[in-house]
Image: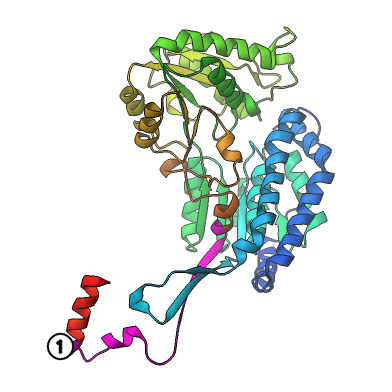
Amino acid sequence: MEPLVASPYSSSETPDLQQLFKRQQARSEALRREDAGPRAVRLRKLGEWIEQNRTAIQEALYTDFRKPATETDVTEIWPSQTELKHTLKHLKQWTSIQPVDTPLALMGARGWKQAEPKGVCLIMAPWNYPFYLAIDPLISALAAGNCAIIKPSEMTPSVAALLSRMAREVFDPAEVAVVEGDKEVATKLLKLPFDHIFFTGSPQVGKIVMRAAAEHLTSVTLELGGKSPVIVDETADLRDAAEKIVWGKGINAGQTCVAPDYLLVHEAVQEPLLAEMQAVVQRFYNATGQGVATSDSFARIVNQHHFERVAGMLEDAQQHGATVAMGGHVDARQRFIEPTVLLNPAADSRVMQEEIFGPLLPIRTFRTLMQATDEVNSRPRPLALYVFTQNKENQRYLLRNIPAGGAAVNETILQLAHPELPFGGAGNSGIGRAHGYAGFLAFSNEKSVLKQRTGLTGIKSFYPPYTPKVQRMVGWLLRWL
């Protein structure tokens, strides 16, 4: 990829991966014995570094794909800080022993759960939110007491180099290290027997990661993607819906795993919704009237390959009969694609078959909720479902009948920012959960412990030999306990 601006950061040399992995294995044994205190110290140091390097983070994101500084603050820095603060607030509670109730049949025993670190973890971060999606799982890994190796995407080299600098300045490499490089480096990393792999990216690469993890029976968290639908019924507040849909699609130029991917709108409100969306795009990205391409609030496609992919989808949609109702302008020199609405694309067109990951929004209409539900459910399960309605029964129907990794009602994107809501996919859109306590558990082995008293216990009544008395007691057990 050719960056829009020359990178001010220099890439570090790839370390000896075997040696680095062994160092972290050795260090992980010491971390296993630590309580919440030292973990909190590491997390605070990370938070301080983020605060002190806000400008550097903004510059790196702008260098890689001209991401606006304010958007970097909102989508990369703020959620990282939110996750840190939430984790520090609850860390002592999460790491403490969690008692559980004991059934009467096990009278005399008591049980509890205690979280223990998995060990050495691999975090494979994507290019679309290259800072936040490296830092967020790192916070969970450190909170759980693990060592971690981060593999950032080679498609965002400035952020990758910045993450390397962060690791060197904040952490002992035996605890946290960043390894830069291309697919070859990623392949070498996947051959190592990590204790957990946290991958964010496409379903296609996710399958490769899962196959590699299977060789070592390594647990995985796969945060993938898919085609996240937006359903707008005839009762929705159209102005409000238009603002939230355009915002959710416009962030990062549509290069977001939970971005609205396609819109299903009740046929009675398609035209007024489209008019509202056109007005919102002008307010958000063309306030000066000089065109969206001149806006300082709209990012660019990350590299030439992805620009050509998204531009090709636009062309394919039109060839399959879709009408460009808004936008449609592209500029290969800037890797710019205007926010574009496509009306009535064919079901077999690429924009309706592939995850778009760009600022194209196909719109199709429906008459009944069953029609909309059937269309969504004809595809693999999405990472996010967005429902815009003021009818509670319609809300219940759609949430109950459409499986998805997560959902938002009368909003887009923000379910990702709620630290108490576990985030993850279903089926093709992912495995496992992240953020908050769910992220802590993803990097932990939740050890179950039963402690029995010595001497007489209830279960001893069922020891052999299996006399008639024992058989009667077993019958009583099955009937009443």
Does 392 sit above or below residue 155? above
Q: At which x and y percent is residue 40?
A: 73, 61
Q: For the point 78% across and 46% down, which residue is it?
A: 50
Q: At which x and y percent is residue 14?
A: 73, 54
Task: Give the image's coloring scheme.
Answer: rainbow
Residue denoted by label 1: 468
Going by the image, does 415 lie left or right of 344? right
Q: At which x and y percent is residue 62?
A: 76, 31
**Is 452 part of what is drawn in magenta?**
yes
Look at the image and tell me in which quarter the C terminus lies.
bottom left
Look at the image and tell me in which quarter the N terminus lies.
top right
**Is 332 part of what is drawn in magenta?**
no
Q: 429 or 320: nearer the eye?
A: 429
**Residue at the left extreme?**
468
Q: 54 or 429: nearer the eye?
A: 54
Q: Quadrant of residue 143?
A: bottom right
Q: At which x and y percent is residue 217?
A: 47, 63
Going by the image, does 282 lie left or right of 70? left
Does 67 sit above or below residue 83? above
**Mark 1, residues whose alpha carbon is within 10 Å: few (<14), some, or many (≥20)?**
few
Please indicate, yes or no, whether residue 327 appears anywhere in the rendered image.
no
Q: For the point 77% across and 55% down, which residue is it?
A: 44
Element marked by disc 1: helix
Does 41 sit above or below residue 47? below
Magenta stretch bounds: 441-469
Q: Quadrant of residue 56?
A: top right
Amino acid type of the residue tagged 1 in the rendering: Pro
Q: For the point 67% across and 38% down, which residue is it?
A: 155
Going by the image, does 288 lie left or right of 185? right
Does 351 sit above or below residue 206? above
Please indicate, yes or no, whether residue 193 appears anywhere in the rendered image.
yes
